[in-house]
Image: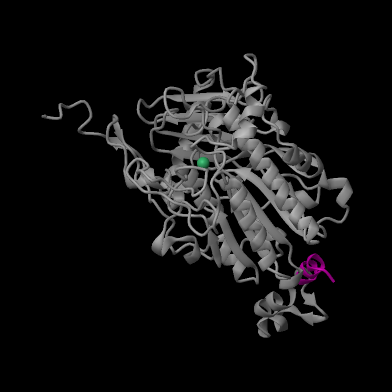
Amino acid sequence: MNRFEVRTRIRSGYLFGIPIRWAILLNFGLWANAVFAADRPNILLIVADDLGARDLGCYGSDLHESPVLDDLAKNAIKFERAYAPSPVCTPTRASLMTGQHPARLGITIWSEGASKPDRSRPLLPGDSLDHLPQKYVTLAEKLGSAGYRTAVVGKWHLGDGDMAAETQGFEVAIGGTRWGAPPTFFWPYKNDTRFRDEFRYVPGLPFGRRGDYLTDALTSAAMRVIDDAGDDPFFLYLAHYAPHTPIEAPEDLVRKYESKIQDHLRHRNPTYAAMIENLDANVGRVIDHLKRNGKYENTLIVFTSDNGGFLGDPKGRNGVVTTNAPLRSGKGSAYEGGIRVPLIMKLPAGSVSEPDAIRARIIEERVLLTDLHFVILDLAGLDPLPAGTIADGIDWAGNLTNTEKPWPNRPLYFHYPHYYETTTPVSAMIDGDHKLLHYTEDGHTEVYDLSSDPGEMKDISAADPHRTARVLAMLNHWKSEVGAKEPTPNPQFGKESGK
Ligand SMILES: [Ca+2]
């Protein structure tokens, strides 16, 4: 009897011929965890940083090469319309860990931005926490209590000290801090001068040599974690810093792309391209390691990114980084380029009854990364929604294993009460193909039909003002329900400083 049969029998009311109410009397929960932990699938959750929706070969890049992920997408499940719940790092990561929306968590900007809110603009940003409070039960805590060995390797960005990853359910944490990026991707991954106003470092890695590259080192650490889990099921959150700034990559790969750049290409940053090819090769190293150790088949692999591609700072250190075209805008924005991300999943063997028929699929439905919290728990054989769970995502694991099952319909919400190079404070709602954005600073609303206008070029808010008003009211209702923090007028804006 595998775990899926067990779950079916639990639903039927009997297990091993024992009525479930007796099993509950026998403290069934703990017993089941002890008996079946070894049978659970391993979970490898790889989250790239700032990787845009069009940055991989299989998602339409005309420059970046990503043969490993292309191959995984072709032979597994590729999502065409996956959304991060936030256009920036920390909120999306907090949402993955908790299954709650960033606006409900009160975490709406990256950690450093929450610590030092921008007071130079017409609106003061909505209040945001700079860490994930302990009161939440994280994905790692849930999986850990079901017998998983839990590790995070790479970016954490949800606090340090009392809020470090080690305090949020991860037995092992390597390479993560409250910071969103390393000062450099080259050994020793720290700065000898201050990075803005901080000395930054990447903790927990063994000795390296000059020229060693961070994505390679994190992957090696992840492979050791897999070895150290032995025969226990593991949850490995492999949170690569690449391809976030600073845009730096191994020299040989940069040269390769320098020779490939042409004026007509959409993607034209050779160093960024090299970061992505290196990231892809490192995903390949982990996959090969799983295969060598006989763990690949029973591992759920999820590959995604935390927000849309970073357009860059044309006059700054990083230059033009990427474009998410034909999607509009990029990181920070509630337009599609800021919130759409790649998402590829490989199911563990045993989770589907006809693996060949339904493993390789392209899914067009709109999904939210917050959903992954529940989908992963379900695929791990746990109850994703025990009584009392606050869920801002839905569990569509059943749709992956049963192609006949209709996908649930629900609106998607976004709330970014902050400024960024690409935006002023904005909230948005997607209902079917209908997308509404509301900009707080000047109060204007835009509406797009994503089916005919995926690039959000033609604002149709005036075409049906009643519908626009109704959808805006729904968005506002949702914001008040989750307690979304709003920006407020900045009384100091426009006044002389007095100096
Ligand atoms: Ca990010």
- Residue nearest the viewer, comparing 205 with 497: 205
Any part of residue 7 in sight:
yes
The segment highlighted magenta reads 1-10
User: What residue is rendered at 63% in x and 36% in y?
Assistant: 276
Identify the image's colour scheme: rainbow, by chain, secondary structure or one colour: one colour
Q: Quadrant of the N terminus?
A: bottom right
> Which secondary structure class fits the magenta region best?
helix
Please determine whether, in this image, residue 394 is positioned above or below residue 460.
below
Left or right of 90 on screen, residue 126: left
Q: Is residue 8 magenta?
A: yes
Residue 194 coordinates in the image, percent (x, y): 35, 44
Left or right of 17 on screen, residue 476: left
User: What residue is rendered at 42% in x and 28% in y?
Assistant: 421
Residue 435 coordinates in the image, percent (x, y): 56, 30
- Residue nearest the viewer, comparing 2 with 16: 2
Residue 368 coordinates in the image, percent (x, y): 60, 44
- Residue nearest the viewer, comparing 292 with 116: 292
Q: Quadrant of residue 21?
A: bottom right
